Image: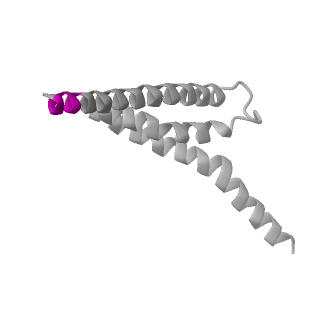
Amino acid sequence: MKYRSTILKGDYYMIFTLVTIDIISQIIAVILGCWSMWLVNQKHKEHPNKKWACILGLISEPFWMYTLIFHGQIIALIVKLFYTYSWSVGIYNFWIKPNLNNKKEKNNEF
C-alpha cells in the first residue's frame, strides 16, 4: 500500500508541475503578446520603440506554441506558425535590413 501512495504522489506532482508550467507559459505569452501588439499599433510610423514589437512577439512564440501543443490545438498552432513567420519578417525589416543598407552606404562612400 505504501508503494501505491508513492506512485500517486509522483503522478500528482507531475500533473501539478505540468499545469503550473502551462499557467506560467500562458501568462508570459499574454504579457509579451499584448505588449508587442501595443507597440506595433503606435500612432507614429517612426515610433522609437516600434521596432521592439517583433522582438517581443518572437520571444512570446515558444510560450504560445507550448500552450497550444499542451492543449492539443493543432489548427491554432498552424496559425501561430504564420505569426512566427510574420514576426521574423519584422525582425528582418527593422533590424537586419537597415544594417545591410548602412554597410552598402559605407562601401559606396569610399
Whether residue 72 appears in this view of the structure is no
Q: Quadrant of residue 59?
A: top right
- Outermost residue, right side: 110
Q: Residue at x 71, y 54 (%)?
A: 98
Q: Residue furthest left?
A: 1
Q: Residue at left 49%, top 25%? A: 27
> Which quadrant holds residue 43?
top right
Q: Where on the picture, by quarter, is residue 10?
A: top left
Residues rendered magenta in the picture: 2-8
The answer to whether residue 16 is visible is yes
Q: Position of residue 12 (x, y in %)?
A: 27, 27
**Residue 82 vs residue 15, the one in the foreground:** 15
Q: Is residue 12 left or right of residue 84?
A: left
26, 34: nearer the viewer: 26
Q: Residue furthest front?
A: 2
Q: Is residue 6 inside the magenta stretch? A: yes
Predominant SS of the magenta segment: helix
What residue do we see at 61% from left, 27% from top? 35
